[in-house]
Amino acid sequence: MTTTKPNALKLPLEVSNLTVSHGRKKLLNSVTMSIKPGELVAIIGPNGAGKSTLLSHILSSRHSNVNFWGTPRKSWSPEYLARYVAMLPQHSSLVFPFTVREVVEMGGYPLKLPRHKLTPLVNDAMEKTGVVPLSSRSFPSLSGGEKQRCQLARLFVQLGLTEGRDMLLLDEPTSALDLHHQHGLLTTLKSMANNGCAVITVLHDLNLVARFADRVIVMDNGKLVMDGTPWEVMTSDELGDIYQCKFDISSHPRLATPVLAVS
């Protein structure tokens, strides 16, 4: 099992012909993709397209055709990989009455840091995600959006010592957030990408995708069917066919990013 630091000269993620089946149905069908450092990549597609399945199987140790920084996934020890790759699933199963601060501190477990070095990472992560006022609240008592922000803070602690050589996988991180926190989260993710982090997130709001993503990957029926910039993907007739609706496309008056409306 590898315990070397990620090779900065290698791509953070390479997936080659990843196929996952359940019975006779192929959940993923020969998916091939790679992610560069500093990219914010959004994965989109209709329900059941394979988006969440792709994220979960990227981290699965069973697959030999997934490489992190040039090293096969199965060669990484889980404890060491957790210092460089973090994932936020759609739903949290945490039911014990830990306080918000205690949950955020759990992100420091792979780092093996003494308290005086962990505390600044925890404080910074809680500030970034706006959960400082919730610090002493019991986690199960939080709303869905508050839980999401608390878990995000935990991941930020987990990746707190990577110096930009890290990867963050997020499965619908904005689904429970209000408009203010949606934009705040994606602004933070964009900043992390600008500092070298490879960010991969599943999103459903196509205008958030157009606003923040560097690349857009479109999944449909377990296949990767499109991969390009927001302008390349959002203006494609194929996108309307996949979502079974027609889009009117315009340009944001200030940002020059695509704006989509269902016609």
Image: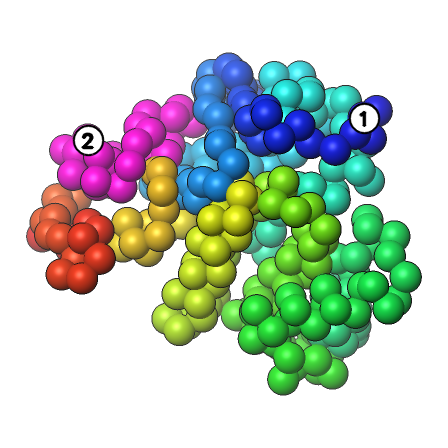
On the rendered structure, is 36 left or right of 249? Answer: right
Residue at 48% from the left image edge and 26% from the top image edge:
34
Q: Of residues 178 and 48, which is closer to you in this image?
A: 178
Q: Position of residue 218 (x, y in %)?
A: 34, 34
Label 1 CA crowd tier, 10 Å (few <14, some 14–19, many 20+): some
Secondary-structure class at tag 2: helix
Number of the label disc, if any, that sits on residue 2? 1
Q: Amino acid at mark 1?
A: Thr
Q: Is residue 80 magenta?
A: no
Q: Position of residue 252 (x, y in %)?
A: 17, 58
Q: Amino acid at mark 2?
A: Glu
- Mark 1 vs 2, N-terminal side: 1
On the rendered structure, is 88 left or right of 218? Answer: right
Q: Position of residue 126 (x, y in %)?
A: 64, 71
Q: Quadrant of the N terminus?
A: top right
Residue 69 image-quadrant placement: top right
On the rendered structure, is 190 left or right of 213? Answer: right
How far apart, in angstroms, are the residues tagged by discs 1 and 2? 42 Å
Single out the residue that lies furthest toward the right. 114
Residue 155 image-quadrant placement: bottom right
Residue 262 visible (yes or no): no
Total numbered labels placed on residues in the image? 2
The magenta segment is: 217-243
